[in-house]
Amino acid sequence: MKFYKKGIFTLCLFLLSLAIPVPSLIALPISIEETQNYRDIGKYFEYTIPADKEAGLNQILREDTLWRPNVKNVILIPRNKNPVWLKITLIHYGNLPHTYFLHLSNPVVDVFELHTEINGKWKTVWSGEQILQKNKPIYSHISAFPITLSPNESKTIYLKIRSDNPIFSFVSIYNARTFIAYSKKQDIFFAAYFGAGFMMFLFSLFLAHTLRYRKFFYFFFYLATILLLNTYSTGFIQYIEFGNSNTWKNYLFPITILLTSIFGLLFTLEFLEIKGSFPKLNAFTKIYILLLVFSNVLIFIMDLRNFIQMAIILVFIPIFIAIATSTLTLFRSKKKLEVVLFLLAFGSILIGASINTFTVQGIIKPYHFASYSLPLGSALEVFFLSLALVLRVSDYRKSIEDKQELDLQLKIAQKLQNGLLPKKRSHVLNYPLGFRYSPATDIGGDFVEILVKENEVGLFLCDVSGHGIPAAMIASMTKVSLEIWNDMLDKPALAAEKIRKSLLSSLSGHFLSAFFVYLKPNEKILRIANAGHLPLLHLDRDGKITTYTSYGRAINEHIQSDIVEKTFSMPNEGTLILFTDGVIEARNIHSGELFGEERFYSLIQSLAKEGPQMICDTVVSELEKFQHSKKSDDDITILALSIDSE
């Protein structure tokens, strides 16, 4: 029992020792020489966070100030909003006085305030926020301070950091020659980086403006935010100044991170075209984009330090989404190379961002490469994405060329089809004529022909299955075949069979329904032949409808049509109406309801006393109103002939 109580007492003393700060005895002076460079010296610093935000150097120099050792290789004190004071003692062993440079790498513009004692007087220099470029100790984007030491001189320096950034980076000491070379090397590297990035920026703007595809606009904005973000990681944001305050830079930093995530995800959705392949992933990504958009508003509510930390955490999720999406797409997409390049792109930025983040967090040792990891990762990302876009542009160019060729063919086919339609005429012999044609696509499969001899009239209407160029070509061949009927106008069934035989080798799986009408007014002869088409309608002046039809199958290459010809006495008055099934099968786009025969018959009955052209125009107009669209699922054709001789 005594042993147990002793153990509890010892444990309590240990926990109490952790809770009560004591003066540091661990941090040791760092010995520096002219021939050496020193990196990751964070562990040689001691720090204190005074309760008074406005505490000055005099208060810090008091003997009762409690200094704590910084146990990491980087300076990382994310939870404290008050200014942090750091101190380090440097000893120079050399034969001559030498100037060293204390370099602090940090992605956000902060106030670095360095205090050194020279000849018994304290000198203060600044770098960062609210200190204009021309007043900085080093004309460079790097936050660095010159420190001159005499041989065997020991000097303690005090560094005050006021920052809204939760992440402090690693610290290095360079001799003068190495620092100047290092600074120039970085300037050249980053100048080339931003120069290439700006060229890519202009290229993406050109693509977005020329091709007008959303994915290129998203890439343009994504690249713009990437370049802006890297002005922070490289320190080049120091060159951009407006007025005497740079506070706006600290607010712009997290907003840029979130905008980069938003445009990166939008570009991912558009480039990989996952809407159809992975609808759930597409929905999740859009929800996350909305979350990121909403997160920008939180900058007006949250503390800036917490907002920056939130943005840094949120930025990794879009990278993982892009990698996961491209990996899934890789197994389904036919364009493997584009997806592989996309995967390599976001893999590069993930590696670069991870190295940078883990380094400044002190998780991994701060290697020299860490200074370049984020810009290099983003440079590789932009390079791979550019290659992927070049491939996509090549595909688009090919599709545009194909489309242009198809458009040319369509224009030729449209001219061809226009030749199939009856020439503009208002009468046949002395009988008023009306006609309307509304194709479902640019090129339809309906075809009308009117043959006129001295005392005879032939009306022909057919509906070729399908749409587009194949249907138009078959309709064109049908027109040529109709020359057979022109020679035997009074024998429509015989002509229909000969036409069928002439088309057999050209139908290629298509079929056509057709209706032949032969009229000889002076002898009151009405003769018809029907090849699987809707009946001929006679509408008298009182609104009564009579149908004329006969047996016959549609013209096709497999089964004979067996068309039966019928002869009737031609009515004395009224209107003959031929139409295709596009009239009665017109569909309401909202309810899916068909126009139907009953509605069609009721409509034309209300037009019994109107002329044929008025009947055709009204029918097409009412169909468009019913559909709530001028485009239909099938071609609409209606032909009307008044048999009231003028």
Image (tube, rainbow, N blue to C red):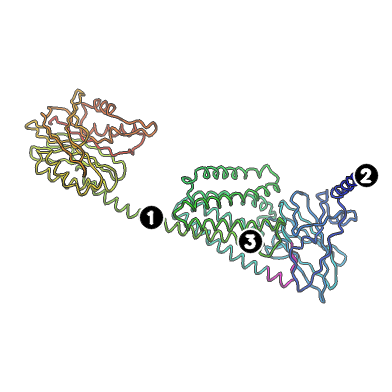
Up/down of 520 relative to 133, above or below: above
The amino acid marked with disc number 1 is: Ile
- Which residue in the structure is indicated by mark 2? 2
Please identify the quarter of the rendering in which residue 434 is found: top left
Looking at marks 3 and 2 on the same chain, the residue that comes earlier in the sequence is marked by 2
Q: Quadrant of residue 426?
A: top left
Q: Quadrant of residue 475?
A: top left
Q: Which mark is residue 400?
A: 1
Residue 579, given in percent of the width and then of the height, sits at: 23, 35
Give, as a three-letter code, the residue at label 3. Ser
Q: Would residue 175 be counted in the magenta stretch?
A: yes
Question: In the image, what residue type sits under mark 2?
Answer: Lys
Q: Is residue 564 left or right of residue 32?
A: left
The total number of labels drawn is: 3
Q: Is residue 93 left or right of residue 224?
A: right
As rendered, which of 12 and 630 lies closer to the eye? Answer: 12
Q: In the image, is 571 to the left or to the right of 441? A: left
Spatial separation of the CA atoms under disc 3 and disc 1: 39 Å
Crowd band around label 2 with a 10 angstrom C-alpha radius: few (<14), some (14–19), many (20+): few
In the image, residue 27 above or below residue 498: below
Q: Is residue 125 above or below residue 49?
A: below
Residue identifier under label 3 = 373
